[in-house]
Amino acid sequence: MQREAMSEALEELLFDSDVVGARLELLLPVDGVYWRVLEGVSADVFDSDASSAALSNGLDWPLDPLESYVTATPCADAVVAVGVRRTMLQAWIDVVEQADLPLQRVDWLVSCAQRCLHHLSSGWTGDVAWLFPHGSAVRLVLIHDGVPEVDQTFARDGLEPDALISEIRRSVSAWQTLMNRYVPLGWWLSFPESHNQMFMLLIDAARQDCLLNQPFAWNPAPWGEDSGDDPLEPLEQLALFGMLVEIH
């Protein structure tokens, strides 16, 4: 929300990287953006303000229909709606404008990463369980045929690893029982390698579950000496790779 400081930082970054004539593609952060799966509607349902406001009232998310932007994209036999507060999106647009850059595209980190995950796991015929960090918590997304059917967050503060694993297992079992669907699960863990081992306990080899994680063919290099050698977070890398996949 500090537009002037952010635009100056962006300008300095591009100048120091010797980038001229850049077009910006923006990935909105995890917080402040929400999604819902809709059935029985078309992707143009949010094209008119009247239908958008009427439908948004029933989406059960903390967004005011009159103070938010909503977009919808087809996803298998359903539609995925993504919403963001106007103030948040406008703040980023202002940052780009103050940096005198053309804004090519806006997407959301989570939905872009999920589409990339679907692309990378296209050879897997079972369902997908995707885990990634959300602040100090852990977020679980359960996916069937490319559609994110469950999105649940588990607090980690004060919780032993065994208790967290048990809570995640209960959520997965409840979903499978509700859907009456007991197919193998492919797990994708978007954590640093040092944290993945804890969640390997979720993979039930007796039910033919497996780990879907695979190395990326692309990883951006640090832009300068002051940027450090730390790699991108796995969730960020998945989303950025997803943007490249969609471009090509």
Image: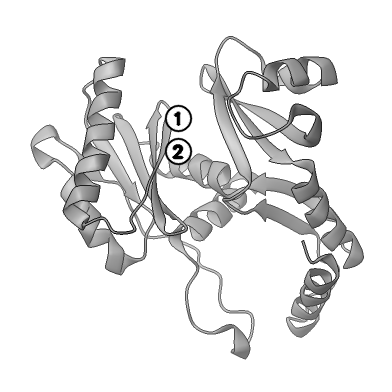
* Position of 37 relative to 88 (above/below): above
Residue 57 image position (x, y, % from top left): 68, 20
Name the element at disc 2: helix
Q: Mark 1 points at which residue?
A: 146
Q: Which amino acid does label 2 sit on?
A: His
Judge whether residue 48 can be spotted in this image: no
Asked if the residue under mark 2 is in contact with the one under mark 1, i.e. CB atoms within 8 Å, the reply is: yes
Q: Residue at coordinates 51% horizontally, 60% vertically from top-left?
A: 237
Q: Which amino acid does label 1 sit on?
A: Gly
Name the element at disc 1: loop
* Position of 217 relative to 172 (above/below): below
Pick the residue in front: 194 or 59.
59
Mark positioned earlier in the residue sequence (1 or 2): 2
Instruction: Tell which residue pokes out farthest to the left in this image.
Output: 206
Could you classify mark 1 by the number of other residues whose Cα lies within 10 Å: few (under 14), some (14-19), or many (20 or more)? many
Q: Is residue 154 left or right of residue 76?
A: left
Q: Quadrant of residue 241?
A: bottom right
Cα distance, mark 1 to mark 2? 6 Å
Kindly identify which numbered label has been placed on residue 118: 2
Badge count: 2
Q: In which quarter of the image is residue 100?
A: bottom right
Could you classify mark 2 by the number of other residues whose Cα lies within 10 Å: few (under 14), some (14-19), or many (20 or more)? some
Residue 97 image position (x, y, % from top left): 90, 60
Residue 9 image position (x, y, % from top left): 77, 76
Q: Residue at coordinates 76% horizontally, 20% vertically from top-left?
A: 52
Instruction: Tell which residue pokes out farthest to the top in this image.
Output: 40
Instruction: Tell which residue pokes out farthest to the front in this image.
Output: 158
Residue 62 image position (x, y, % from top left): 63, 35
Kindly identify which numbered label has been placed on residue 224: none
